[in-house]
Amino acid sequence: MGEMSKTATTVDTAFRFRSLPMKTIKPLLREPRVVIAGGFLLILLLIALFAPYIAPKDPLEQDLMLGNMPPVNYPGAEPGYYLGTDDLGRDVLSRVLYGSRIALTVAFVAASLSAIIGTLLGLAAGWYGGWADRVISRLVDIWMAFPPVLLSVLLVAVMGSGLHSVIAAIVIIDWTRFCRVVRAETMAQARLDYVMAAQTIGFSRSHILRREILPNVAPVLIALVSLEMGIAIIVEAILSFVGLSLSSDIPTWGGMIAQGRQMIHQGWWVFVFPLLALFVTVLAFNQLGNGLRTALDPVMRR
């Protein structure tokens, strides 16, 4: 009888673990924002990965004889330059495609590191309380008092330009957002009955934090990561715009916008197309984050 009970329990556990992904996937597929924005970002990720094979031209190749050529179907357009050229004769389409690599790299790395640091500190402050909560909360309050854009410019100016400096500046600024949200969610979850039941059973505080509270904070955290990716792309574009990101030879959307601003009357396409790519990508990350929050949070699905 004991063997039959053990077998039944094992089968039931296996069934629940197999059905868990479907319970998560189905709400995601029913949320239009997740499908549309996620599909766009997946295509953008593939474009970024395979940019060397997709781009029609070398993004650094210059030809002054082809400077300021308009996009295809406009009078004076040059065949093969579908979005036109800049004042140095470089292909705008190829530079926009290569710029997506920098934008997505900064988005994924900076958002992930910010999430890890902020989540660990937020869980500690919200669950353990006491001096840990007081120290971390005061640190967050002080950190968030600085204007984020000005602080990022200052940090990159001190650390020097480069991809690592840009990512480090974004992480130093934005971990506080994760910390504050996760702390609030952790404190809310800690008051619920399932946490009290786990404490009554005798689970350790660290076990409850890892196995009970963190999974219930995850929906908010996942949505916040997506929103943070959009913010990271904007910050990188701002730093590129003011010349504090990467070398001017490396295509970035912010750098292209800064270049196009100076020649908007002679070549509007140099300004418009990277700005459009920046706008649509950030909008997609924002919509994906809102859609994930709606799909994964059982309260918002009601």
Image (cartoon, rainbow, N blue to C red):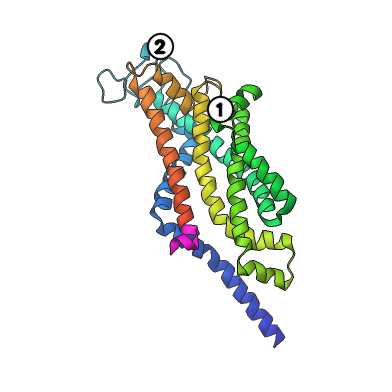
| Residue 257 painted magenta | no
Magenta stretch in the rendered image = 295-302
258 or 134: nearer the eye? 134
Element class at badge 1:
helix
Q: Is residue 25 above or below residue 88?
A: below
**Is the residue 204 above or below the residue 277 in the image?**
below
Residue under numbered circle 1: 150
* Quarter residue 80 falls in: top left
Point out which mark residue 64 bears.
2
- Is 122 placed above or below 78 here? below
Q: Residue at the top extreme?
A: 65
Q: How many marks?
A: 2
SS majority, magenta: helix
Q: Is any part of residue 49 visible from this angle?
A: no
Image coords of residue 297 (percent x, y): 50, 59
Secondary element under disc 2, as helix, strand or loop, is: helix
Ranked by sequence position, the earlier of labels 1 and 2 is 2
Residue nearest the observer in this picture, 71 or 24: 24
